[in-house]
Amino acid sequence: MSSIINENKLFGQLKYFFNNPGGVLIELAQNAQRAGANSLKITLNNDILIAEDDGCGIDDVKPLLILADSDWSEYVEANHNPAGWGLFYLICMSDNVTFKSSFGSVSIDCDAYLYNKKYRENALKNLNPTDKTEKGFYLHARLKKDKEKAISERKDSLCFFPLDVLFNGEAVERKNAADLCNGYEIKTVYKGSKVFIDPYRWGICHFYDHRPLTPEDLKLELRAIWYGIPIPVFPHHRDAEKGVVIDVTDGSPLTPVLPYRDAIQDDEKLAEFWEFVRTLIVGYCTDKINSGGEKDKHDLISLMEVMQRVATRDELNALNRFYVEADESYYSEDTDGSSQCEKLVIARDNVPLCSEELKLFEIVDGGEKTEMGDPDGFILPQGAITEITTLANSPDWVKDKVQEKVCEIVIAYSKKDCYKGNYTWHKAVITADKKIAVISEISGCSDGRVFYIESPRDFDEIGAAVFAQRIYSDDGDTYDSQQYYFDQDIERDIANIMGDYKLYDLFEGLQKADVSPSNIKNIKVNRKSVVVTLKGGKQKILKLAA
């Protein structure tokens, strides 16, 4: 067997390996850096790309034209892990390329090089050993159409390389991780590379699940600058939004995915780095939580959320403060059905917290006390029932602090003492551990009951929650219009119960007929008309619609 690789097919398909023309700029800067260059000059205009650096140059052209080959120093080979694919990036997007260095110069017909094996084998016959550079490396490429714009848009990705870069005569602003991460709480070194960590910036604090994190999850909060290459590639240097930034300038503490180095490999290096980061975060959070050094409640809970995701059981048990979630399970003004959840900070020496479970009973016409069934259909005033939830990954002492309590509410009423309008209203006696003035069992328009102790107007305490949870529908009119009609229904019921009517409501129709209520002396209603006698004796006859 002469070969286990189909060379012709590999080269013929090579262009499909590269999907981002702008990546060629990274390759040019990376090679210049490896060559010890101080400066890199790039010009791009009219589909012509020219690049030249002042590095050590290349003595042998062969590795340049052999896929997966390279001829760098032992240090570069050991630390940068060059893949030997970089300049094929350029060949795949160009019509022709000329390379020039201390070896001389060679010009390549790119399509012929990719699709013609004989041309590849004889490409070095085009070598001109006398046409060489005094120092550094030079290339000239005629690009295929529609490549120039994509390359130009990536020029800012060169900012982290330790090079003076000119792009079309303009200097690319140099940046470094230390400046961008100036506000990060933890600054350290990992295997020769600077690391910046800020627990407050971790997006994991805002995730909806509470599962423990893994090394793979770290990549969501990780920005690596790999010898000048930003990983993952980002368009506007948004690295400072990540919770962890590592600036790799020595060794190989992580493994970039080859050949593009646009992601970090899931391997033992990532797992080791994750444990390093995790330990530092745990130490920082523990100190802030236990010492009382973090006074702001939002920031304090953010640190506790981080601990919930990254800490071991023993590390959590070392905390003297943590949080629980308190739900107003029977009151919510949110139309999405979520309860009023509040995060409560508790201390190890706190008195036990009560998580209340609701049971509703009724007594009708002095009869026996009976349970009303599923209480989830009821709306109670805010603060009536509070459910405490502990997270699965919490200190053991937190679970010990939460005690279950059954909250019984008994509603006693008479069927005779009720009003049936848009809804059924019962004047009742409500007995509970807490003062509760009103309870709603409204489940839809014109469907349901309301129980109140003194005044039906106490419904205002729960009206917004009833509308949001039991009335509003995405399939109906606008939120405001649905709320208007619901409020009108409630107001009519309350007015009829109390016998207390607003003058405007009573005379609204007359006002439409341009009759001022203050000027009315007498009203007579006939079968087909209304006769209004005004002060001064003048009459106005209003015909009634059939």
Image: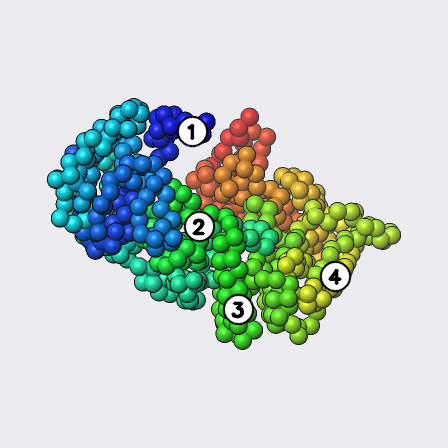
Residue drawn at 34 percent across, 36 percent down: 67
- Residue sitting at the far right: 368
Task: In the rendered structure, find residue 404 and report the number of the disc placed on it.
Answer: 4
Residue 66: x and y in percent read 31, 36
Q: CA distance from mark 2 to mark 1?
A: 29 Å
Task: In the rendered structure, find residue 283 and report the number of the disc placed on it.
Answer: 3
Residue placed most toward the observer, 108 or 325: 108
Q: Nearer the viewer, mark 3 or mark 4?
A: 3
Dot placed on the residue nearer the N-terminal end, 4 or 1: 1
In this rendering, the answer to whether 335 lies above or below 352 is: above
Q: Secondary structure at mark 1?
A: loop
* CB contact under 8 Å: marks 2 and 1: no
Residue placed most toward the observer, 213 or 89: 89
Q: Which residue is mark 1?
A: 3
Dot placed on the residue nearer the N-terminal end, 3 or 4: 3
Q: Nearer the viewer, mark 2 or mark 1?
A: 1
Q: CA distance from mark 2 to mark 3?
A: 26 Å
Residue 80: x and y in percent read 36, 51
Q: Secondary structure at mark 4?
A: strand
* CB contact under 8 Å: marks 2 and 4: no
Q: Which residue is mark 2?
A: 255
Give the amino acid type for the residue marked by disc 2 in the picture: Thr
Whether residue 528 appears in this view of the structure is yes
Q: CA distance from mark 3 to mark 4?
A: 33 Å
Residue drawn at 57 percent across, 38 percent down: 473
Q: Residues within 10 Å of mark 4 (few under 14, many from 20)?
A: few
Q: Residues within 10 Å of mark 2 (few under 14, many from 20)?
A: some
Q: Residues within 10 Å of mark 1 (few under 14, many from 20)?
A: few
Dot placed on the residue nearer the N-terminal end, 3 or 1: 1
